[in-house]
Amino acid sequence: MAKKDIDWGNLAFGYSKTDYRYVSNYKNGAWDDGILTTDDQVTLSECACVFQYAQTCFEGLKAYTTEDGHIVTFRPDLNAERMQTSAARLEMPVFPKDRFIDAITQVVAANEDFVPPYGSGATLYIRPYMFGSDPIMGVKPANEYQFRVFCAPVGPYFKGGAKPITIRVTDFDRAAPNGTGHVKAGLNYAMSLHAIVDAHNQGFNENMYLDAATKTYVEETGGANFMFVTKDGTVVTPKSDSILPSITRRSLLYVAEHYLGLKVEERPIPLEEVYDMAECGLCGTAAVVSPVGKIVDHGKEILLPSGMNEMGPITKKLYDTLTGIQMGRIEAPEGWIHVIK
Ligand code: PLP
Ligand code: COI
């Protein structure tokens, strides 16, 4: 086995086809055994439920090459659990947790040559997803489903990697109270496409969504949760029933408290309070920890004291510790690292 001839250091966050993917079909009330296949194409009825009523959910996690040469994934059990929550909310059958982890393990092992080398700055992004696959005309859930996992080597989500980004507070809503914001439904992302295109057209990297009911509290961006550091060094993240429970954010809170000895708070954060924050970052599998340097709130600029050149000092410590755990430089809490080989 030899690594593929890829310019690892210059990869963007994007799709490229790797050799193998996993497919399992659900029919007559049961999942089949599932297979690895080289076929990257999906052929479905023109009336498949996913096309008509967006019955689909997905996950995202990464595989890393560690300092000592192992290939690992980070907390895949939490992705499996979150996908079960997403599936249940969308009236889809759940894919068993042990089979989810097995599917990920098989896909990464089969595509070993695509796992970026240690120190390259790239990682292997893994995308499990599920969709209603049989023809459905009246509004109701599908009877048949497909679960798939593919992967692709990727670089940083935001160009420039660790360079602080500029975001805006948007008037668009991402998720309603009692809606689907807390699950990883494709429809949440469809909702966000117009807002992100508009943000990019206006020169912003991302949108900060506020709670749809009162437009008072910070929710998240289209693809990451927020973390803030107050001027007295407390790490604060928004608590809301309509944001995705980010595995990265939950891990960062643990790291902040137990590895760095910082005070942490998970609570509603009024936008007003953001004007007084010392640091701000976006956290997620794709985003890792991406620093925010400027937030534009309807023409008013919030300039984070950490500036536009580098990560704030606490954000940097969190980033270094989390990625250190993921790449095997720092001992992980029990159960966080799933060794593939
Ligand atoms: N919020 C949204 C809307 C996302 O799409 C993601 C990405 O998965 C996150 C937050 C971060 O979640 P995680 O850290 O589990 O990747
Ligand atoms: C992830 O971080 O895995 C996501 O799904 C976010 C998406 C914006 C790529």
Image (cartoon, helix red, strand yellow):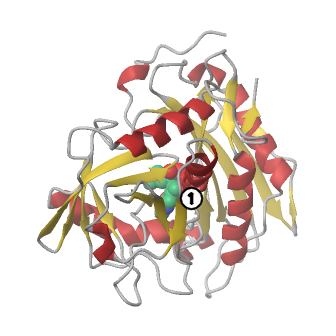
In the picture as drawn, the residue positioned furthest to the front comes out as: 232
Q: Which residue is mark 1?
A: 246
Please identify the quadrant where the C terminus is shown: top right
Q: Is mark 1 within 8 Å of ligand 1?
A: yes
Measured from the top left, where is residue 286 in percent x and y? 47, 46
Compared with residue 121, is residue 99 higher up or lower down, i.e. above or below?
A: below
Quadrant of residue 168 within the rendered picture: bottom left
Measured from the top left, where is residue 194 in percent x and y? 29, 69
In the picture as drawn, the residue positioned furthest to the left comes out as: 299
State the residue in front, 50 or 302.
Answer: 302
Compared with residue 141, is residue 284 higher up or lower down, i.e. above or below?
A: above
Q: Secondary structure at mark 1?
A: loop
Measured from the top left, where is residue 8 in percent x and y? 43, 21
Q: At 35% across and 83% down in the image, what residue appears?
A: 216
Answer left or right for 115 relative to 224.
right
Q: At 61% across and 41% down in the image, what residue appears?
A: 259
Q: At 54% across and 72% down in the image, what residue appears?
A: 54
Q: At 37% across and 79% down in the image, what residue appears?
A: 173
Compared with residue 261, is residue 93 higher up or lower down, i.e. above or below?
A: below
In the picture as drawn, the residue positioned furthest to the top comes out as: 2
Asked if residue 311 can be seen in this view, the reply is yes
State the residue in front, 204 or 291.
Answer: 291
State the residue in front, 55 or 228.
Answer: 228
Instruction: Identify which amino acid the numbered label 1 is placed on.
Output: Ser
